[in-house]
Amino acid sequence: MAFPKMTDLELRGKTVVIREDLNVPIKDGKITNDKRIRAALPTIQYALDKGAGVIVLSHLGRPKEGEFTPETSLAPVAARLSECLGRRVLLSKDFEEARAVRPGGVVVFENVRCLKGEKANDPELAQKLAGLGDIYVMDAFATAHRAQASTEGAIRAAKEACAGLLLTAELEAFAKVLDNPQHPVVAVIGGSKVSTKLELLNNLLDKVDKLIVGGGISNTMIAARGFGVGTSLYEPDLVEASKGILAKAEALGKEIPQVIDVVVADALQEGAEATVCMADAVPADKMILDIGPKTRELYDRVLKEAKTIVWNGPVGVFEIKPFGEGTKAIAQSMADSDAFVVVGGGDSISAVEGYGLADKMDYISTGGGAFLELFEGKKLPAVAALEARCAN
């Protein structure tokens, strides 16, 4: 894919409008995790170093359009950004005030989701946002799958638009996996429901050599193989669809390594007594909460033979002891692998960070929905708008 990049443009003396994803968790007015702010810093700092004035756009939470409230204000974000950049950062919701930023200055424009027409991708609002500066920079990969005024409309309306450092890094990482990967390619897809990832699983079978499934998705697959799953979370109405995935894999010569054994318990709760049983012999009164040791060994072999790995979703209820051993083992296998590893999705990222393995992964994506839609074979609206700039 070809798209204009921020690093290719002359920024000195210009006003750069940067759409970031600074939707950070805030409790009692304080940011509890500033990871997204830190991820945005290189792009903002690059613009400042090149002599530009910077206006930062972002959403926060789910406010009602047209209403600004203290709870959905970006004030804590602006304060944290000021600390990180070591310079004063102005917070504004006035277009003229923001537009007056000078080179070396930084303005955080208030929550764009409070603006009427943002979600509907209103052309007039898109033009106003694009008109805040000379260059419009899309850097919020996590919102690139949404066609909204600040994510897609403003790119098309701007005099000049490009991808920021973060978005560029995301797209280049995905190109290594989707466009020209080294084989064998293995995808690890976990999560609670087949229904949310059915399209993803079907699309991945056309791209990968082996597909590992975990969590509630795996339970439905076990049921599709004709085995009982006790009281486990699964989707009986998608058993047939799961059979279709298994049949497609066989027809394509792709492998979905079958779960051998599982960890079961009476209830999903901290400290519950866990036992291991074979996947084809789950007691009727037990629920599957993790993969067993034999399955962990199988997956370890598969992952260590891989050259490219994509991971989205844990393989067990990793947040609750003692049901996190499978997810931990998966993460460790990836860390020990020579493969190019891309991790996406909040739970997977939390897992690798919690296990102290984040620095062993080649790329950790900031996107959730955008991550999945790329692997489902969909075109992200913001990326399509950037590509169109190159085509014209």
Image: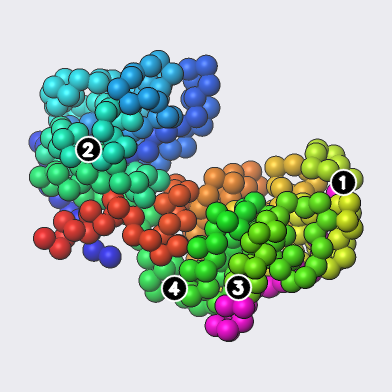
Q: Nearer the viewer, mark 1 or mark 4?
A: 1
Helix, strand or loop at mark 4? loop
Q: Nearer the viewer, mark 1 or mark 2?
A: 2
Q: In which image quadrant can residue 75 be found?
A: top left
Q: Say whether marks 1 and 4 touch (CB < 8 Å).
A: no
Q: Neighbour class for label 4 at 10 Å: few (<14), some, many (≥20)?
A: some
Q: Earlier in the sequence, mark 1 or mark 4?
A: 4
Q: What's the magenta region?
A: 247-265
Q: Amino acid at mark 1?
A: Asp
Q: Is the residue 209 above or below the residue 387 in the image? A: below
Closest to the observer, 137 or 225: 225
Q: CA distance from mark 2 to mark 4?
A: 38 Å
**Residue 40 located left or right of residue 124:** right
**Residue 261 located left or right of residue 201:** right
Q: Earlier in the sequence, mark 3 or mark 1?
A: 3
Residue at mark 1: 266
Q: Is the residue 333 above or below the residue 60 in the image? A: below
Q: Earlier in the sequence, mark 2 or mark 3?
A: 2
Q: Is the residue 19 above or below the residue 364 in the image? A: above
On the image, the x and y values in percent for residue 260 come to: 79, 69
Q: Which quadrant does the N terminus fall into?
A: bottom left
Residue at mark 2: 122
Q: Residue at x 28, y 35 (%)?
A: 118
Residue at mark 3: 244
Q: Which quadrant does the C terminus fall into?
A: bottom left
Closest to the observer, 354 or 86: 354
Asked if residue 336 is among those painted magenta in the image, a careful observer would answer: no
